[in-house]
Image (cartoon, grey):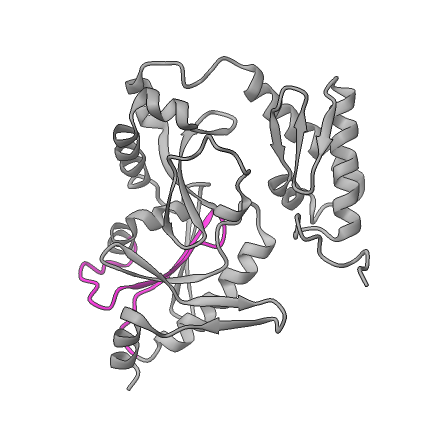
Amino acid sequence: MLRNNDRDQALPALTVNQARMLRVLVKSTMSRAGRDVTVHADHVVDSDDNEYGLDSLSRSVSDLPVKDWPGVVERHLSTMQAAMRGPDKFDVPTEDLLDRTYLRLYDAAGLPPVDWLSYGREPFPGVRELLALDLPDTVSTFNDDHVRRHGLEVLREAGLRNLRRVVPDEHTEYEGVQVLMGSVYLASTALVLDEVVQRTTGERELPNGVLVAMPFRNQLLYHVPRDESIIVSLNTMASMALNGFADEVGPITPYVYWWHDGVFQQLTKHDEDEQTIEVHVDDGFADVFHRLVP
């Protein structure tokens, strides 16, 4: 039997009862602004077919008293509406976009079911790579029309170049895991992971690859395997990734991956029924693991 304190399936940062309250609040806030919306489990759609996702908003209010929710919801929706009403930020010469274009990673399951993001690719299971335009008050995502207009290869090259300039605001170490925190693009620096590792902890050669996790947009976790300490670090990363994905704004993936020569292999899975984390030592990672852990 479903209880009000169970996690909501569409908005897992909230309980069933809290998620119901948020949807009602969003609908009433939009109505006061003169916008009738159709409410879905994880988003609302207005009469102009503009879609407003609720996942980020749900995580923003999850730790706040309910009395503070109306103000947060109103500010969030106002920002999104202002971005939609404003001039087309993409209708400028391509060279004016390049310094503000980033490759950004998203939870594939959390993206809206639309047909105008077909240019995106999955660099590793469950994660989608899209192009983002960094604006003063928000981040806008390139759609297929924007990409056709300005050129995928040119934009992607700029997106990688700008990721290389992203540096963490904080760097700590826990159980052999490097914990980097920073901007909304920090987790996406996994796409230039070898350069991040060299800049952060100095390793130029990575014969054993790198364990990496991107739980949410502002955090990157990694461990460079050298010996049997890989076991402790892998277990620590698995727990941190799962918790960060569940609790923080901008979730990307709850899993740990093994990076080697630019290719990512998923190592962990989550058994929701048993509430356990499974670690899979197979394929290319198995050779490294068994060499380091005799």
* 194 in relation to 144, above or below: below
Q: Determine the main secondary structure of the stretch shown in magenta.
A: loop
At 72% from the left and 45% from the top, the residue drawn is 64
* 158 in relation to 5, above or below: above
Q: In front here: 39 or 209?
A: 39
Number of numbered markers: 0
At 25% from the left and 54% from the top, the residue drawn is 262
At 66% from the left and 29% from the top, the residue drawn is 45
Q: In front here: 94 or 197?
A: 94
List the single residue furthest toward the bottom. Answer: 294
At 61% from the left and 71% from the top, the residue drawn is 275
Residue 223 in sight in this render: yes
Let me know if residue 207 is in the magenta part: yes
* Position of residue 240 measured from the top left corner of the image (x, y, whole percent): 50, 63
Let me know if residue 111 is in the magenta part: no
List the single residue furthest toward the left. Answer: 205
Q: In front here: 72 or 211?
A: 211
Give the magenta-colored segment's residue range: 200-227
* Position of residue 91 measured from the top left corner of the image (x, y, whole percent): 40, 14
* Position of residue 124 measured from the top left corner of the image (x, y, whole percent): 37, 53
Location of the C terminus (image quadrant) = bottom left
Residue 169 in sight in this render: no
* 80 in relation to 220, above or below: above
Location of the N terminus (image quadrant) = bottom right
* Position of residue 136 measured from the top left corner of the image (x, y, whole percent): 47, 25
Q: In front here: 71 or 24?
A: 24
Is 7 positioned to the left or the right of 264 in the image?
right
List the single residue furthest toward the front. Answer: 115
Is 145 positioned to the left or the right of 8 in the image?
left
* 199 in relation to 275, above or below: above
